[in-house]
Structures are given as structure tokens and as C-alpha cells.
Image: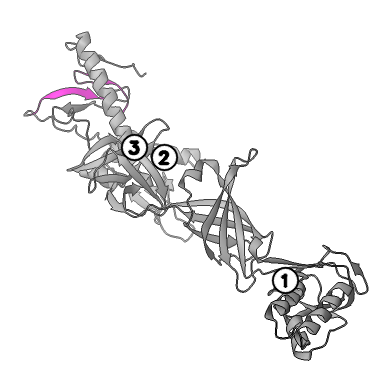
């Protein structure tokens, strides 16, 4: 009885079931070899029985079993010249004469023409289909390349104002404005008494009301300029000109729309010249100062578009442009600061907020590109497999450039329109390496002169496998 016929019975033995062997004579006179589960489950019995549902096990006769006879060898083509025989398992072991491996498998003949010297690898259509080989032509296309870097939101230095006294003054009254309040240009902030400002206001009014100097524009402009030099708000000067009366206190107003960052004024306090009482910043436009790695600095230029995302607003993007590349490298982080100006009309971006930026450094012209999966890169060698058609594939060294969106630029070694393998290329590469190795072994075997040995001996081996 063949081993294949005994297999079900041996499996039954492993399950602890009674497995009396069926003799060859019994099998010959029509007795079933064994009985199998009617549901197709891997269960057998040496005697008739029923399953848990009461169904009879099915008898298996000698003719029902698949043949265990070995498959016939592939016919040798007498019209083609055999160069050598290779190991059927793909091992680097060849022979100049027919032979078998330790498992009894015949070595595979390699014919003249299958081992072409043009460096190509030839695969059968069946092997191409089984391995899932896919090809795609190299094309010239615009390449989107993004440099990503972290950053921090900062105030636009040109949109920050301070209110500081230019003469000794006293704060008489403060409006309902605190740190963090949003104010508008011209909104009252406080009332100030200053002897210097009051004196200048009286002098200006007397000049423009005097019968002697009232018509002298030069004197009037000079007196008015004194008030301007003391930083008196324009609204306060206009109110004096309308009322023709010098006020005791001056109403100080906000110079711009913005957020109160600092409020140092307190009612009744004395403010000396130069003391900052308020600091106001307009955050309708802000800066994103991002840290770009030194290796990417050569690709950054003023005017490039930038996409900024804040961690506080997932999914929302803020668009801006590169305005300044700071001329200094951070010694510790090896990064350079890049300033991006962003519109912030709804004040969503706040100072010191962390953001992630992506700078688009794509070239303005089209580039020859292939999918990244097409490039075989071992660190020192970069290559692609060119699909030559009819199952032939040529390994070719290439030089690569920039990468972006799953594509890589090819700067040398490939032409537009040539198809490259994008899937299962590592399998073809392994086949190519194996082919090169076998050719080397074949050359060594021919040089050693071992071409007259018996079929049961190994000749031209790279190494004997037990």
C-alpha cells in the first residue's frame, strides 16, 4: 500500500483511534481502504461508522485515491542546445550533465538563448501572473515636493504699538480695558493730566485765536506741532480746535485695532516720560516662524507657498508665503528660521501657538519621474527593472533626484516612456542575481574541464548540498 493510502490511517493512529491496516489483497477484491467523514472534514475511520448527525461515513476504494505516482519529467527539446542544468530549488548549484538533487528532483535544463548575455531576465507569462508583476511608464510630470517643519506663531512686529508718555503725567481715569481686551482704533483708554500738555494746548489756542497771529499759518503750525510731538491723540487736538478751550485732562485713545497685551496704567499713578502704559498688537495678520533643517535650506526661497496647520484646529489649513529666510543657523539644532506671513482675520492663530508647516518646493517645470516602489535601493546602488516586453526585464542603474507624493525624480539612466516594474520587482531582482551567479558557476565549471562525468555525480558545483 502506498504511503498516500496509509496517510489517513496513520492520522487516525495519531488521534488514538483503532486503525487496523487493510491488506493489499483486501483492497484488490473490492474492500474499501477506509471510510471518510461525509462532510469532507479531515476525519477517517478504518471501519464503517456514523458521524454525530447520524450520517454514514463514505467508503474510499483503491480507484478513488489520487495517484501518488510521480509526475513525468518535462520533455527535453532535441532542437535546442542545453548549456547546463540548474538546481530545481533555485540553489546556486549547476551541472553540465543531467542529475538529481538529494530529494530526487531532476535538475532543470537551461537552453541556449534562455541565458542571454544582454543582462535581461526572462520570465514566463505564468510566473509573471503568479508573482503579480506590474509595470508603469516613466513620465514627465510636475512633482509636488513638501518640506515639513515645526513652527511657532509670533506677532507681526510692524503691528505692535505702545502708549508711552512723553512728559510727566498723571493718570486721572482708566476706561474698562484690561489685558486681553480687544480694542478698536480711536477707542478711549484713559484720561491724562499733564502740565506740559495743558500749557502747549493753551499756547496753540491762543495762537490761532489771536488777532495778531491768528492769520499766521507758520506760527499756528508750530504750536500744533508741539502737541503732536507730545503724542497727543489727533482726536484730542481736533476737539480743542472745535471747542476753542484748553482741556484740563486729555483723553488718550487706542492708536490701532488689536488686543491689549499689557496694561501698566493705574488710576492716580504718576507716569514719567518714557513709561509704557499700554501695549496693543493687531493679530489680524501674524507670523509663523518655522525651523527648517539645514539639509533642506538649499531648496527654500522667498515667495514659495506654505501650508500651515495648528494643533488646536485639526483639519483646518492656513495659507501663506515665505517672506524671510533668517541668515543664521542654530548651532544646537542645526536649523534655520523661516518667516511665513499668515492672514488671521478671525484671530484663530494666537502668539506662541505651535504649528506644523509644509513648504512647497516643487520645480516649475516637469520632471521625469517613476513611482518610488520602482527604485531598488540598497544604499550604494539604485536601479530599476525596465520592462522590455515578451517577459524580458532589464536591470538598469539610475540616478535619482527629489521625491514627493510617492514619486521620485530620475536624473539619469532612463528615458521618458520606458516601462519600469513597480510591483514584485524585488523578486525579479533576485532572479537576476541568481542568473548572474549561475553564469559565473557555469563559466567556472567549463574552465575546470569537468564535463565528462557520470549523471549521478555533481560537477561544476558552487557547493555540494547534502
Residue linked to disc 3: 399
Residue linked to disc 2: 9
The CA distance from mark 1 to mark 3 is 54 Å
Left or right of 195, for residue 101? left
In which image quadrant can residue 83 be found? top left
Q: Residue at x 81, y 84 (%)?
A: 206
Left or right of 57, for residue 432? left
User: How far across and down, in percent of the image, does residue 389 sit?
Assistant: 18, 44
The CA distance from mark 2 to mark 1 is 88 Å
Residue linked to disc 1: 259
Determine the residue located farthest toward the left in the rendered image. 79
In which image quadrant can residue 353 be found? bottom right
In which image quadrant can residue 245 be found? bottom right
Say how many tags the image has: 3
The CA distance from mark 2 to mark 3 is 62 Å
**Which quadrant: the N terminus?**
top left
Find out whether the residues at labels 2 and 3 contact each other: C-beta distance under 8 Å: no
Q: Secondary structure at mark 2?
A: helix
Determine the residue located farthest toward the bottom in the rendered image. 243
The majority secondary structure of the magenta stretch comes to: loop
Q: Which residues are magenta?
A: 80-100
Give the vertical position of 309 relative to 407 (above or below). Answer: below
User: How far across and down, in percent of the image, does residue 85 sit?
Assistant: 21, 23
Q: Secondary structure at mark 3?
A: strand
Amino acid at each position: 500500500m502506498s504511503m498516500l493510502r496509509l496517510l489517513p490511517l496513520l492520522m487516525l493512529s495519531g488521534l488514538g483511534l483503532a486503525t487496523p491496516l487493510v491488506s493489499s489483497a483486501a483492497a484488490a477484491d473490492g474492500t474499501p481502504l477506509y471510510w471518510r467523514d461525509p462532510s469532507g472534514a479531515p476525519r477517517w475511520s478504518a471501519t464503517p461508522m456514523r458521524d454525530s448527525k447520524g450520517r454514514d461515513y463514505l467508503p474510499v476504494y483503491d480507484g478513488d485515491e489520487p495517484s501518488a505516482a510521480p509526475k513525468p519529467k518535462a520533455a527535453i527539446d532535441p532542437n535546442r542546445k542545453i548549456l547546463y542544468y540548474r538546481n530545481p530549488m533555485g540553489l546556486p548549484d549547476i551541472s553540465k550533465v543531467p542529475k538529481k538533487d538529494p530529494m530526487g528532483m531532476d535538475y532543470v535544463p537551461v537552453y541556449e538563448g534562455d541565458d542571454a548575455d544582454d543582462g535581461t531576465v526572462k520570465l514566463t507569462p505564468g510566473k509573471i501572473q503568479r508573482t503579480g508583476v506590474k509595470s508603469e511608464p516613466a513620465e514627465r510630470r510636475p512633482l509636488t515636493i513638501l518640506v515639513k517643519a515645526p513652527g511657532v506663531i509670533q506677532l507681526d512686529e510692524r503691528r505692535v504699538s505702545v502708549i508711552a508718555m512723553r512728559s510727566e503725567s498723571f493718570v486721572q481715569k482708566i476706561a474698562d480695558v484690561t489685558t486681553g481686551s480687544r480694542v478698536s482704533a480711536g477707542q478711549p483708554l484713559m484720561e491724562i493730566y499733564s502740565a506740559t500738555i495743558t500749557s502747549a494746548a493753551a499756547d496753540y489756542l491762543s495762537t490761532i485765536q489771536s488777532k495778531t497771529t491768528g492769520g499766521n499759518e507758520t506760527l499756528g503750525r508750530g504750536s500744533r506741532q508741539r502737541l503732536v510731538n507730545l503724542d497727543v491723540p489727533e482726536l484730542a487736538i481736533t476737539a480743542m480746535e472745535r471747542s476753542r478751550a484748553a482741556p484740563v485732562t486729555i483723553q488718550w485713545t487706542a492708536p490701532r485695532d488689536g488686543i491689549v497685551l499689557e496694561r501698566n496704567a493705574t488710576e492716580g499713578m504718576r507716569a514719567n516720560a518714557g513709561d509704557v502704559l499700554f501695549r496693543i498688537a493687531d493679530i489680524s495678520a501674524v507670523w509663523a516662524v518655522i525651523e527648517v533643517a539645514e539639509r533642506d535650506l538649499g531648496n527654500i526661497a522667498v515667495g514659495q507657498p506654505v501650508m500651515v496647520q495648528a494643533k488646536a484646529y485639526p483639519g483646518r489649513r492656513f495659507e501663506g508665503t515665505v517672506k524671510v529666510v533668517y541668515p543664521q543657523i542654530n548651532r544646537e539644532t542645526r536649523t534655520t528660521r523661516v518667516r511665513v506671513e499668515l492672514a488671521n482675520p478671525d484671530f484663530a492663530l494666537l502668539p506662541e501657538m505651535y504649528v506644523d508647516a509644509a513648504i512647497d518646493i516643487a520645480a516649475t517645470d516637469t520632471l521625469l519621474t517613476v513611482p518610488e516602489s520602482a527604485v531598488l535601493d540598497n544604499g550604494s546602488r539604485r536601479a530599476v527593472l525596465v520592462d522590455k516586453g515578451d517577459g524580458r526585464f532589464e536591470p538598469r542603474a539610475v540616478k535619482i533626484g527629489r521625491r514627493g507624493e510617492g514619486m521620485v525624480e530620475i536624473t539619469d539612466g532612463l528615458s521618458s516612456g520606458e516601462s519600469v516594474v513597480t510591483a514584485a520587482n524585488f523578486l525579479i531582482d533576485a532572479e537576476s542575481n541568481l542568473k548572474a551567479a549561475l553564469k559565473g558557476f557555469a563559466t567556472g565549471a567549463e574552465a575546470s574541464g569537468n564535463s565528462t562525468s557520470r549523471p549521478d555525480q555533481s560537477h561544476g558545483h558552487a557547493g555540494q548540498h547534502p
